[in-house]
Amino acid sequence: MNLILLQPDDFSDDGLAVLSDERARHIYKVLKAEPGKTLRIGLLNGPLGTGTVLAIDQHEVCLQCVVEEKVPPKPRIDLLLAMPRPKVMKRMWAQLAALGVGRIVLVNAEKVERFYFDSHVLVPDFYNARLIEGLQQARCTHLPEVLVRQRFKPFVEDDLDGLFPDSMKLLADPTGEKRLGDFEFFDRRVLLAIGPEGGWTAYERDKLQGHGFELFGLGARVLRTDTACIGLLSTLAEKLGHG
Amino acid sequence: MNLILLQPDDFSDDGLAVLSDERARHIYKVLKAEPGKTLRIGLLNGPLGTGTVLAIDQHEVCLQCVVEEKVPPKPRIDLLLAMPRPKVMKRMWAQLAALGVGRIVLVNAEKVERFYFDSHVLVPDFYNARLIEGLQQARCTHLPEVLVRQRFKPFVEDDLDGLFPDSMKLLADPTGEKRLGDFEFFDRRVLLAIGPEGGWTAYERDKLQGHGFELFGLGARVLRTDTACIGLLSTLAEKLGHG
């Protein structure tokens, strides 16, 4: 935990936060903070700041918090991801939040097994805890918005354009002749689409291209979904200047 | 498995390979191959090719193999990694091989716990199996060379220059003002150094800089070792044109 993330409920108006959950235990046991110690804090979807320990014991920590005026910019990258195997998705939540993603849409595809959508990894309490873990690791405050869409066609036809009206849309696909380095991004948001193990079908690819996606290739290597996701998000963030 | 990786032992001179291990089971059960079916094969540290199934049952597969003349180029990136927690390293082996690394040096550092080096994840039979799994996923044949160095100072002073004589040496560090995008690589090999959770000490950083490492920063986000590794290797590979 490189940041203690606070939510509106944790706070009173005078900037006092009283914690008695996992965060309090972390501050007491791992950080071994004593009164007077200053910790990095952040408000969920808000600014970063500092919290000075006023009182602490093994059950409760009381912090006097001061936050910065400026809220860090929201990550410029969104992710459209064919729902991976639940055990892969379970590992990915924290990493996606740490790398910085504005919105994550998990969508069905021909090569996605239907039962993936029944998994507990798609329960909001489950994934929000992991997303927050990733934010606290990376010292960020923007909680990715998560949408789950179990029907590919209605999502693409009815929702996609409205959800991502001005985004540059890029689709990782072995048939793509361009490389990620060939695109100019200017200051547009980027929506990155990553298919299932086994790839999108020709129908799905055509459908996405019909809604503005441009293809790009990844070279000869065939990567696992999680490796590809982390690699592409990092490469894009580097290109966008980590905005 | 997107490639069946063969070793010299699997072969007779006439290009016949008889498999009776995990690969045979995979070809029989998952690929459900029948006689006449052609599979992608590769020779360890050698060329790619195809293997035609001559005979198959649940115990044994016999392949007639033809390989390409050209051996794919060795990955241009090497990795100097402060030994991560064993459970993190365990997950990383296959991903490092899939992303393409020529040589991996696992080194001690002040913030590395000594017991990490006692882990079974550093036993060659253990990591080679996982590296090969990654190669078979990514359709590559170059097995990364692995070196383990439990003493930081003698490694840097006595081994480093000889092991990486012409490499461009880059060190990921929060104090780095340059970005990965600021470097020109031409056709040099790249040695990427990634520190422990908690970072290199000032002494270690100075020592590495004294042996040719240049610092670069990663932006505000603090990433886990595995996320940072995958992200940086991907970003570098993209810059190097996946050579």
Image (spheres, coloured by chain):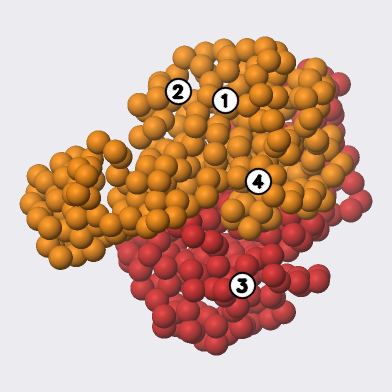
Chain colours: A red, B orange
Q: Position of residue B53 (x, y in %)?
A: 16, 58
Which residue is at 9% across, 49% downward?
B58
Number of residues whose C-alpha sits closer than 10 Å to that of mark 3, classed few (under 14), some (14–19) or many (20 or more): some
Q: Secondary structure at mark 4?
A: helix
Chain designation of label 1: B
Residue nearer the viewer, A166 or B22: B22
Residue at mark 4 shares a chain with residue at mark 1: yes
Residue under label 4, please give it.
Answer: B232
Find numbered disc 3 in the image and state the secondary structure of the residue it sits on.
loop
Amino acid on which disc 2 is placed:
Leu
Q: Nearer the viewer, residue A193 or B33?
A: B33
Who comes first in sequence, dot 4 or dot 1? 1
Chain for mark 2?
Answer: B
Work out whether residue B33 or residue A83 is closer to the camera in this orientation and state it.
B33
Residue assigned mark 3: A178
Is the same chain shared between marks 4 and 2?
Answer: yes
Nearer mark to the viewer, of 3 and 2: 3
Q: What chain does mark 3 sit on?
A: A
